[in-house]
Amino acid sequence: MITFNKIALSGAPNARDLGGYETTDGRRIKPKRLLRSGELSRTTEEDRRILTEEYNLKTVIDFRTDTERLDKPEIGIPGVEFIHLPIIDESTLGITREKPAEREMFGDLFGELAKKNQSPEEYMASVYQSICTTDFSLKQYGRFFEILLNQTDGAVLWHCSAGKDRVGLGTALLFLALDVPQEIIIEDYLFTGTCLQAEIDAAASLLAPRMPDVDTASLVQCLLGVRRSYIDTLFDTISRTEKPVSEFLRDTVNLDKQKILDLKKLYLENK
């Protein structure tokens, strides 16, 4: 069991500090260096003060697409660099926009799934499979690591919309590079469901009147929540390559042995 370091931001319920997680060799991730979150457009002035004054935030990496950014623009923070790094292109977007209030989007998506005779679970599996194997997405994660390698001071925060799919996979790749055990990677990923449960419940309530014949609670939980099978897509992808994790990271996101050593030097405490 691990301790989750939630950051108390009223406008970003899925924000947390990855400091303290233990690696296979007994080292720990440095606190106030690596932060994951959902989108920041609802953050308050106090939230932004916490990030800058208490966490020394220096860089924000936005994994969202252009469409998402136009709909919910970033709020600038003095002294913080914002980097746009979309992990997927518009055609692959689908539910990873993760906008619980958009009932029309869910209705349209459910209709498309019915036409294809595809379950929500199968849809989510296809989204994760695409992100794990598409050259565009993997190259963008490679750029993510280059940014981390140049972050010598302060904290870096990366986010997408809800901070679960694109952020979840990017965080898992980072954990693999830092030698965080798989069971901790999975626990951290699944904790997102706890952080987002209130928003998931609210989305189901909004959708229910529009789709009275559908178990909207189960549907929204599947699409906006997290499941072990989703993150297992990454581990299954690695397993199919029949390569050690280090070689997978080298061949997919351009993390060679020296870069991995540099990441550990930057973000792990000394023994």
Image (spheres, rainbow, N blue to C red):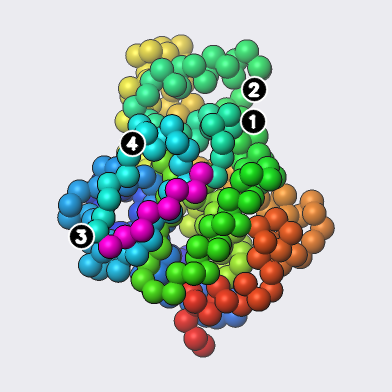
Q: What is the quadrant of residue 81 in the picture? A: bottom left
Q: Secondary structure at mark 4?
A: loop
- Residue 118: numbered disc: 2
Q: Nearer the viewer, mark 4 or mark 2?
A: 4
The one nearer the camera, 35 or 204, is 35
Say above or below: 155 vs 82.
below
Residue 232 magenta: no
Residue at mark 3 to residue at mark 1: CA–CA distance: 41 Å
Amino acid on which disc 4 is placed: Lys
In the rendered image, residue 50, in percent from the top left (x then y), is placed at 23, 61
134 w.r.t. 150: above or below: above
Q: Position of residue 20 (x, y in %)?
A: 43, 72
50 left or right of 184? left
Element class at badge 1: helix
Disc 3 + disc 1, Cβ < 8 Å: no
- How far apart are the alpha carbons under marks 4 and 1? 28 Å
Real-space CA distance between mark 2 and mark 3, rounded to the nearest whole angstrom = 45 Å
Over which residues does the magenta segment extend?
79-86
In front of the other: 204 or 239: 239
Q: Which residue is mark 3?
A: 49
Q: CA distance from mark 4 to mark 2?
A: 30 Å
Q: Earlier in the sequence, mark 3 or mark 4?
A: 3
Q: Could you say whether the residue bearing mark 2 is in a helix, strand or loop?
A: loop
Q: Residues within 10 Å of mark 2 (few under 14, many from 20)?
A: few
Label 4 belongs to which residue?
72
Residue 37, percent across and down?
39, 52
Going by the numbered disc 3, the residue's amino acid type is Arg
Marks 2 and 1, how far apart at CA: 6 Å
Residue at label 1? 122
